[in-house]
Amino acid sequence: MKPTFDVLGIGNALVDVLSHETEVFVENMGLNRGAMTLIDEDRAHELYAAMGPGVEISGGSAANTIVGLASFGARAAYLGKVRDDQLGEVFAHDIRSTGVTFQCAQADDGPSTGRCLIVVTPDAQRTMNTYLGASAFLGPDDVDAEFVASARIVYLEGYLWDLPEAKDAYRKAAQIAHEAGNEVSLTLSDSFCVDRHRPEWLALVEDQVDVLFANEAEICSLYECDFEEAVKHVQGHCKVAAITRSAQGSVVVSRDDVQTVPAHAVDHLIDTTGAGDLYASGFLYAYTRNADLATCAQLGSAAASEIISHLGARPECLLADLAPAHLSE
């Protein structure tokens, strides 16, 4: 059966709140600079009250990637959990407005819809403080087998791996995808996530992941070694690994090859929020069109360069306009 969707993303359904702040703000608020920190609802209210004017949109790492794919023209879908509250309605309406098929019943009890408070400092570094709320309670019962099996690639977000229910949902989705003859992709999301889940993720990457996304710090953390050794390890574990290295571009690892692809030039670096997410958008768009791996990485880099040239993790141009320079349709 031909898949209905190119990519189905599964992750934390969050409303992103982004603002520019000073280094002094980061220090005074006791933020973990450059990382993603999980916070409770009280801390979320405290930080939100202290932040200056910003941008509020539906987000979460996998959601950003899926919206990017829709901007490329891919058939994109998303599965995530929100509450039946105001932010839940905002998330659902906003992501659907981008052309993404969004499926998940809104919870009628439990925690409120999650949100990610993102502070961007003058060096374009982003510091994320995430109240997961309802998103963390995605479980196996929320994974519709027909919906998951209808996607050529199921893309899983590492941030959602902290609760047993979510792990079971991921494993169920991966099993459904493989039984349908489709592929599973995972993004490691954050080196702190890797530290928390290393043994499980090593097994996951080796046994269930076809296409892995990571940055240099994450892949080195996963294998607890330097970059060159990490590349050798991952080469024997999954079909494809795409590893980003900021200004040094990316390295694409397959069973029989390792390719280094230069970064796409950007005139003004404004905000690195979503760079890895949109790299995955471009890579997966090209991948689902059967492009060679170097071309996948080039389009990923082009999408990442667009996103870091402005505030926020949503493209400001139609990403489909980037594709002709890299793909021969």
Image (spheres, rainbow, N blue to C red):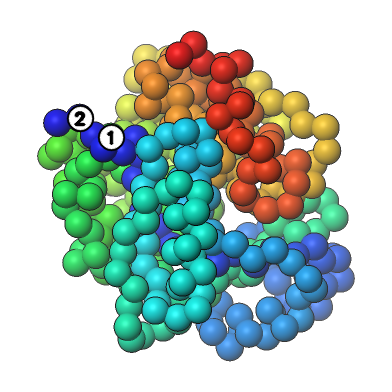
Residue 231: where, in percent of width, then height?
A: 47, 29
* Residue occupying the point 43% across, 17% down: 291
Could you tell me which quadrant the C terminus lies in? top left
Amino acid type, callout 2: Lys
Query: Which circle marks residue 134 in the picture?
Result: none
4 sits left or right of 89 in the view: left
Label 2 element class: loop
217 sits left or right of 158 in the view: right
* Residue occupying the point 46% across, 24% down: 286
273 sits left or right of 213 in the view: right
Label 1 element class: strand
Corner quadrant of residue 246: top right
* Of the two numbered discs 2 and 1 in the rendering, the one whose residue sits closer to the viewer: 2
* Residue occupying the point 14% across, 31% down: 1
* Residue occupying the point 85% across, 55% down: 122
Rendered view: 292 above or below 109: above
Rendered view: 303 above or below 186: above
**Residue 169 or 4: which is nearer the viewer?**
4
Residue 123: where, in percent of width, then height?
A: 82, 51
Amino acid type, callout 1: Arg
Report which residue position mark 2 lands on: 2
- Marks 1 and 2: in contact by CB < 8 Å? no
Quick check: can you spot residue 287?
yes
148 sits left or right of 192 in the view: left
**Residue 177 or 3: which is nearer the viewer?**
3
**Residue 128 or 316: which is nearer the viewer?**
316
Quick check: can you spot residue 136?
no
First along the sequence among labels 2 and 1: 2
Residue 202: where, in percent of width, then height?
A: 34, 46
Disc 2 to disc 1, how far (Cα)? 8 Å
Corner quadrant of residue 262: top right
Query: Which circle marks residue 152 in the picture?
Result: 1
